[in-house]
Image (cartoon, rainbow, N blue to C red):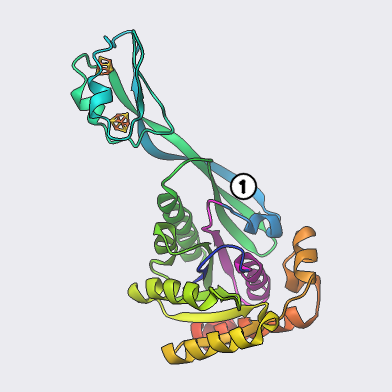
Amino acid sequence: MKQLVILSGKGGTGKTTVAAALAHLASQEISIVLADADVDASNLELVLDPTKQKEHDFMGGQVAIIDPEKCTACGICADVCRFDAVISGDEVYRVDPLACEGCASCFYQCPEGAIRMEEQQAGMWFRSDTRFGLLFHAHLFAGQENSGKLVTLVKQQGRLRALDTEAELLLVDGPPGIGCPVISASAGADMALHVVEPTVSGVHDLERIMGTTDHFGVPSLVVINKADLNLARADEITAFCAGQGVGVVGRIPYDTVVTEAMVQGQPVTAHTDGPVTEALQGVWTRIKEQLLSKEEVQQ
Ligand code: SF4
Ligand code: SF4
C-alpha cells in the first residue's frame, strides 16, 4: 500500500479539486482509501457525497473548571494563569474555556482544591462510504486547536483500513500551509503532490512546503493549476522544480467547468471530458508511473 498526500503551500489553489479527481481516476483502476486531512475545512466531502457509516467524538485538550461551591475567591489562580483565562469575581472566579490552554497551573496551585481539569470535545471524525472508496474525514469545532492530533487520527484510521483491506493506495487530501497539521498529514507518506498556482507567491509557497516535505524525506511531485493564466510564472515554477530535481507532472488549464463540477458535487473528471480532465488524467498516469509498481496497477 502506498500513501500519496496532496498539499499546497496555501489554501485555495485547487488542492481538493485535484484530490477529488485523483480519487475518481484512481478508483477506476485500483482499490483506494481516502482521508481528508484538511480538518479545519474538510471540502472533499462536498465533492464525494459521502454516506456516514460511523461517527466518533474527538476529545481535544483539557480545560480548567472552577467549582463555585469551593472557591473562596483568593485570586491565586488568576495570578498563576499566564493566559489571562481566569475571570475574577467578588465571590467566585471562573475560567474562560476559549482562553484556557489547559496548562493546569491553577489546578495545582488552588489551596481549596476547587479546580478540576476536564477533557473537552473538540470535534468529530467519521468513516463514510463514497462511490470511490471509504473516506475518513473530520470536523474540528470552531475555535478549537489540536488539529494536528485530529489529522493524525484521521490519517491513521485511513491507513489501518487500507492495510486491513489490502488497498493499493491511501489518498490523503492534506491541509494547506506548512504548519503542524501538514507535518502530521505528510508523516509516513510515500509521495507528496504539491498543487501550486502560477502567482507571484507560487514559487515562494512551493519552496516552503517542499522544504517541509524534504525535511521528512517525502519525495515531491508538482502540478501547476490554472497554468495558462500566467505562462511565464508557470515556466518559472517548472524551472525551479527542475533545479530541485522535482518532476512537474501536469499543467491544468483554467476552466469554469471546475466550479460547475464543484457546484454539482462531482469531481471534474467525472463531470466533463475537456482539457482539464485530460490534464488530470495525465497527472494520474505520471503518479502511477512513479508511485505504484506495475503489479499494483495491473491488479
Ligand atoms: S485559587 Fe481556587 S479558591 Fe482561589 S480563586 Fe482560584 S479557584 Fe477560587
Ligand atoms: S489551566 Fe492554565 S490556562 Fe487554563 S485557567 Fe488554569 S492556569 Fe489558566
Identify whether 43 is placed above or below 170: above
Residue at 53% in and 72% down: 169
Q: Quadrant of residue 251?
A: bottom right
| Front residue of this view, candidates 1 and 145 | 145
Residue 55 percent location from the top left of the image: 56, 42
Instruction: Check residue 39 for magenta coloring.
Output: yes
Q: Quadrant of residue 132?
A: bottom right
Q: Is residue 134 left or right of residue 93?
A: right
Binning the other alpha carbons within 10 Å of mark 1 as few (below 14), some (14 to 19) or many (20 upward) gives few
Q: Quadrant of residue 91?
A: top left
Identify whether 152 is placed above or below 2: above
Name the residue that disc number 1 marks.
53
Identify whether 268 is placed above or below 294: above
Residue 18 percent location from the top left of the image: 63, 71
Q: Residue furthest front?
A: 200
Residue 46 percent location from the top left of the image: 69, 55
Query: In terms of secondary structure, where does tag 1 sit?
Result: strand
Give the extent of the magenta segment: 14-40
Q: How many marks?
A: 1
| Front residue of this view, candidates 163 and 268 | 268
Residue at 42% in and 56% down: 152
Residue 278 percent location from the top left of the image: 73, 83
Residue at 33% in and 74% down: 215
Can residue 3 be seen here? The reply is: no
Quadrant containing the C terminus is: bottom right
Instruction: Check residue 60 for magenta coloring.
Output: no
Distance from mark 1 CB to nearest ligand 2 atom below 8 Å: no
Amino acid at circle 1: Gln
Q: Is residue 276 left or right of residue 18?
A: right
| Front residue of this view, candidates 250 and 178 | 178
Can residue 171 be seen here? The reply is: yes
